[in-house]
Amino acid sequence: MVETRVYQKSDLNLAAKVLQQGGIIAFPTETVYGLGADATNDLAVRNVYQAKGRPSDNPLIVHISDENMLELFVEDIPLKAKQLMDQFWPGPLTIILKTKENNALSKYVTAGLSTTAFRLPDNLVTRNLIKKSGLALVGPSANTSGKPSPTSANHVLDDLNGKIEGVIDGGECQVGIESTVIDLSDDLIPTILRPGAITREQIQVVIGPVEIDAHVSNETEVPKSPGMKYKHYSPNTEVVMIEGEIEVWYQALDYYQKKHKQVGILASQLILNQLSSYPDIIQVELSQEKSIKEAMQHLFSGLRALDKVLPEESGIILVEAYEDVSENLGYMNRLKKAANQNKFIV
Ligand code: AMP
Ligand code: MG
């Protein structure tokens, strides 16, 4: 056990020192909170896997504070990668590149792969932390492996208090789900390995045709990105997706209340209003109007909030599904995993 300290934005010098000494500091980003440690320090990186309980073959994203830092690790940056960086960095896009043969990164960062994922986060506090430490930082989501990702400093403490040296409190994350991951490490058509707030269409405007890894839409395919094969984003309470009009919600509520389930609902205010006459349900707002941006921002925090108050055995969380179209892909990818693909069928 270590004492986990909460740092404010004014304490960056102290937090940077802890990182230089090989400690772990969780940091805010626009997507979710990351678990920061010196990406060149074997022991520090191994401690990150251990604190999260993350399988060691699931590589980590390297966080940098400006594009020039890439030169330390990458020989030639492909033109398409440069174009994406110009357009989307700093921002929620992770780019996988072929790495120099002799680079300073710990071998545990990429679990032996010859490619590395890089990201320049859109959060000034964290970019300053990276600058002050003078280190590239690994930054997997700062949650226990398998749980919903953290979008506030309190979420980080809920999972990792006593296991890491500190967390920088930067308030609530704006995007709410992890970055879009795109593979540009070979000469093939660039491939999205993980959907996020930046969509395929937005990327195609900049670099032309882009594929989406078959595993993103078809869970039976073997994933190219090692992390995608693991159970993810799941609260302890069972999660079920609700797709369709208000009648489907009525039917689902009747069904689960008859089974004596304690029901929690995560949906837009529009839906919650229409369900307010049901007794004994716990409501959490996903968005005010039906908005995918707000839904993305509140998905993980909503799952965490309901998981805290519902009984693990007899509780159930019903979550609003969005249509399977491109801009909803990131949200639905996380929700489907949280729900283990479980959808309420009338
Ligand atoms: P997280 O750290 O939880 O945000 O997850 C990072 C994601 O990026 C995981 O799905 C990893 O498997 C994936 N990833 C990281 N580095 C690579 C890489 N070099 N090649 C393919 N996927 C990667
Ligand atoms: Mg994660």
Image: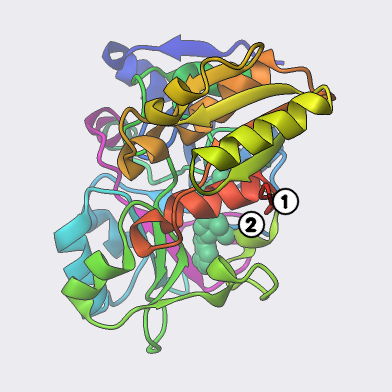
Please state, as top left, top right, bottom left or bottom right, where the N terminus lies in the image. Answer: top right
Rendered view: 277 above or below 246:
above
The picture places residue 330, in percent across and down from the top left corner, at 44, 54
Q: Which of 184 and 138 is in front in this view?
A: 184
Determine if the C-beta at disc 2 is less than 8 A from ligand 1.
yes
Residue 341 in which image quadrant? bottom right
Instruction: Answer whether residue 118 is magenta in the image.
Output: yes
Using residue 277 as the reference point, say whether residue 144 is left or right of it.
right
Residue at the spot x=69%, y=51% of the render?
345
Q: What residue type is labelled 1?
A: Pro
The picture places residue 236, in percent across and down from the top left corner, at 74, 30
Neighbourhood count class around disc 1 (C-alpha, 10 Å): few under 14, some 14–19, many 20 upward: some
Residue 199 in which image quadrant? bottom left
Range of magenta residues = 104-128
Disc 1, SS: loop
Task: Report the residue marked by disc 2.
Answer: 58
Using residue 93 as the reference point, say whether residue 5 is left or right of it.
right
Neighbourhood count class around disc 2 (C-alpha, 10 Å): few under 14, some 14–19, many 20 upward: some
Residue at the spot x=53%, y=29% of the render?
266
Check if mark 1's residue and mark 2's residue have beta carbons within 8 Å. Answer: yes
Residue 271 in which image quadrant? top left
Q: Residue 55 carries which label?
A: 1
The picture places residue 63, in percent across and down from the top left corner, at 38, 47
The picture places residue 89, in percent across and down from the top left corner, at 21, 53
Confirm whether residue 164 shows in the render: no
Q: Residue 174 carries which label?
A: none
Q: Which of 281 and 133 is in front in this view?
A: 281
Query: Magenta part mainly helix, strand or loop?
Result: loop
Q: Which residue lies furthest to the left in this view?
A: 86
Residue at the spot x=15%, y=60% of the render?
87
Disc 2, SS: loop
